[in-house]
Image (spheres, helix red, strand yellow):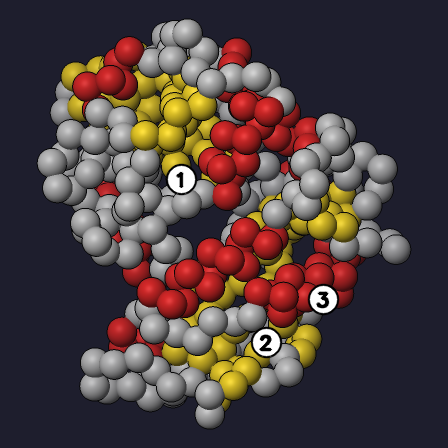
Amino acid sequence: MEKKNLDWANLGFAYLQTEKRYVSNYKDGAWDEGALTEDANIVLNECAGVFQYAQTIFEGLKAYTTEDGHIVTFRPDLNASRLADSARRLEMPVFPEDRFIDAIQKVVEANASYVPPYGSGATLYIRPYMMGTNPVIGVKPADEYQFRVFVTPVGPYFKGGAKPITIRVSDFDRAAPHGTGNIKAGLNYAMSLHAIVTAHEDGYDENMYLDPASRTKVEETGGANFIFITKDNKLVTPKSDSILPSITRRSIMYVAEHYLGMTVEHREVEFAEVSEFAEAGLCGTAAVISPIGKIVDHGKEILIPSGMEDMGPTTKKLYDTLTGIQMGKIEAPEGWIKTIL
């Protein structure tokens, strides 16, 4: 299979249209068979539920070329399960999890020439999503839905390596108690846009959201979970009902315990503790781990001991081990890697 003639090493983290995508429609209480299409455009009624009441959910994962030349995806079963949880919470029909996996398989196969070569630093980003499509003017769930999957080749999230970032404690809340913070709904990300734009304007890379009830506990950023390393080398990840259950974070926890022999604590993290940690980072699909060098709380700087130059040593081990598993350099736990081609 011949790869597209792209400048793989210089791809940005941006949308580049590929040739095929998957579409399935839900009508009269059932999903149709679904199919690949070349049409990247969507035509909907002006009153569609997705426009009026933000009934839309999504997922994000990647396809990789491994060291031995295979094209694989990483734990797509967890994306299928999380999309199902998101659908239930927004009163949308669940797209069957086995069909989700099959759709990923079909779209990546059909766009295999866009999967970047091993060693390029680039990957194929996969975006499954679902939306309400029929006209809805009263406040209620839609009756008809569309599930789609598209892919786009993307470069590394960080050009020149993952340098530690500076984040601020946000005055905004990301999610309400008992709200939708624990699902991957479009509305959650819309809520974070003003906060991230103003953070960038003020010179910060990201926001740290605290729990909205007491504003004393660490939750997450607009699109990633936090990880912390204690001075005695334990991995600590914040726990809350309004934090998205990140697949990357859950994988890092497993890697820490089973590959690196670390003690792992998934628990509530008081903001007062943050200054006591030796290392800190954000984790998610896009960058895997983004190290944090500094946290600013309304002018008060908290300097993470690992510094502003490089990843902390334990964070680097976690990053190298997880990416090694994804790229086929390190043996993966059973069921983590799905081979496409």
* Residue indicated by mark 2: 23
The secondary element bearing badge 2 is classed as: strand
Q: CA distance from mark 3 to mark 1?
A: 28 Å
x then y, percent, for residue 47: 31, 85
Q: What residue is drawn where x is 37% and y is 55%?
A: 183
* Relative height, residue 7 to residue 232 (above, below): below
Q: Amino acid at mark 3?
A: Lys
Task: Give yes or no for contact between labels 3 and 2 (Cβ–Cβ under 8 Å).
Answer: no
* Residue indicated by mark 1: 224
Q: Amino acid at mark 1?
A: Ala
Q: What residue is drawn where x is 14% and y is 25%?
A: 298
Q: What residue is drawn where x is 62% and y is 22%?
A: 259
Q: What residue is drawn where x is 68% and y is 66%?
A: 102
Q: CA distance from mark 3 to mark 2?
A: 11 Å
x then y, percent, for residue 197: 28, 44
Closest to the observer, 22 or 232:
232
Q: Please say whether residue 164 is visible from this viewpoint.
A: no
* Residue indicated by mark 3: 106
x then y, percent, for residue 281: 41, 25
